[in-house]
Amino acid sequence: MEAPSLSTSHLVIMLGIPGAGKSTFAEHFAETFKAPIISYDRLHKELSLCEIDQKTENSVISHVLKYMFEEISKTKRTIIFDGRVYSRSSCEELTKIAHKLGYKPLFILVQTDLITAKKRIVKVNHDNTASVTSEQFDKIASQFNPIDRNKANVIVISGKHAYQTQLKIVLKYLSESH
């Protein structure tokens, strides 16, 4: 089965608490549509190999993201952004970027209950460290307030459903919005 193409250039922005299933959906969606994916966590992982402080790292990531958006937008292909988008201000900033680049912002909110998400994300690595601590997860989850669903294109999917079910919901929304 050939993947359908997206006729409108979207900046697809993944939303959800850590462990909701944003990255899993984003990776499958990018593969289905042969779309580029920009992953904040991938950039963070690559930069963590360098000896730089957190503030500098965040600044570098912001600059690299801006550059990547500008360059990929030249293709007018849909772009998937899998980043740490937890607040309304970050959603508004990404909406401005999308419009500036001639893209239509589309938010996909992956909802998963707190217990499941926390189990997925708070895992101890082989060196007895966690990529996200229980305290960090609780803080992010309690402050998660990304966007007013009435003011933006927001699709809500369950982080517990299979990708095919999630994709049907997104495709239905996209077909109805045209």
Image (cartoon, rainbow, N blue to C red):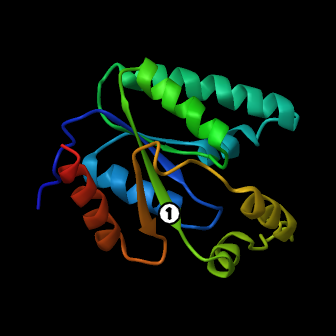
- What amino acid type is highlighted by mark number 1? Val
* Closer-to-camera residue (81/150): 150
Q: Position of residue 106 (x, y in %)?
A: 40, 43
> Residue 139 sits in which quadrant?
bottom right
Q: Secondary structure at mark 1?
A: strand
The C terminus is located in which quarter?
A: top left
Say which quadrant the N terminus sits in. bottom left
Residue 178, placed above or below residue 113: above
Tell me residue 171's x, y (percent): 24, 57
Whether residue 131 is visible, yes or no, is: no
Residue ID for mark 1: 110
Q: Residue at x 35, y 49 (%)?
A: 30
Quarter of the figure with residue 100: top left
Q: Horizontal and vertical percent for residue 67?
A: 54, 20
Query: Residue visible at 34% across and 36% down?
Result: 10
- Indicate left or right for 85 with 105 as reference: right
Q: Name the residue nearer the viewer: 49 or 133.
A: 133
